[in-house]
Image (cartoon, rainbow, N blue to C red):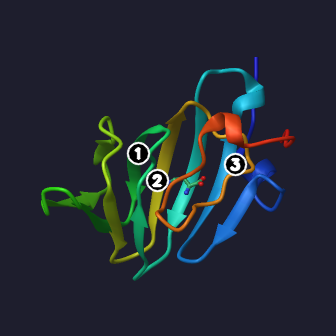
Amino acid sequence: MIVRKLSEVQGTKCHIHAKGWDSVRMLLRDDKMGFSFHITTIHKDAELALHYKHHLESVYCISGKGEIEDRTTGKVHLIESGTLYALEQHDMHFLRAFEPMVMACVFNPPVTGAEVHDESGAYPAPQSVKGVSV
Ligand code: 9YT
């Protein structure tokens, strides 16, 4: 059994900081759960262009307010506490935070810990992430 506290992972190498967001990656590939689990905060006024071509992602908003725009249809959905979205079609999207948004995110296949977004907002395919075990 794995038991971890957010406070134990905050500030470690599994707490990633990037422009507009930071993410505490609480479960990673090497935990062998078949998914990774992240507590991600999208910073106020951030707009992220994301496209997880190689991953399925589901996100549950714990707190904060913002919106997600489907870049294929242009449809915009409000995100607030209690909202879940699932990118079951690897949907290209914009994520905008009107106030800090705390999100619980799962990725399938699991993130290894080495990923950073490329210029299209994607993470690389799992087999192209080499030699990093977090
Ligand atoms: C909201 C969202 O797309 N989160 C993705 C996870 C986070 N960017 C991470 O841990 O890389």
Quadrant in which the C terminus appears:
top right
Q: Going by the picture, which residue comes out furthest to the bottom? A: 45
Compared with 65, 63 (above or below) is above
Q: Is residue 43 left or right of residue 8?
A: left
Among the two numbered marks 3 and 2 on one chain, the one whose residue lies closer to the N terminus: 3
| Tally of marks | 3
* C-alpha gap between disc 3 and disc 2: 13 Å
Q: Is residue 8 left or right of residue 41?
A: right
State whether label 1 is within 8 Å of ligand 1: yes
Crowding near pointer 1: few (<14 within 10 Å), some, many (20+)?
A: many
Task: Find numbered disc 2 in the image and state the secondary structure of the residue it sits on.
Answer: strand
Asked whether the beta carbons under mark 2 and mark 1 sit within 8 Å of each other, the answer is yes
Q: Secondary structure at mark 3?
A: helix
Q: Label 3: how many residues lie within 10 Å, few (<14), some (14-19) or many (20+)?
A: few
* Quadrant of residue 4 within the rendered picture: top right
Farthest residue, direction top: 1
Q: Which residue is under mark 3?
A: 6
Q: With 78 as the anchor, is 117 left or right in this view?
A: right
Please state the horizontal and vertical placement of residue 54, each as a whole percent of the image. 49, 40
In the image, residue 106 sits, relative to residue 6, either above or below, namely above
Residue 88: x and y in percent read: 32, 35
Residue 59 is marked as: 1
Q: Amino acid at mark 1?
A: Val
- Amino acid type shown at disc 2: Met
Is label 2's Cβ within 8 Å of ligand 1?
A: yes
Q: Amino acid at mark 3?
A: Leu
Which numbered disc flags the more N-terminal residue, 2 or 1? 1
Residue 13 percent coordinates (x, y):
83, 56
Instruction: Assign a secondary structure to mark 1.
Output: strand
**Label drawn at residue 103:** 2
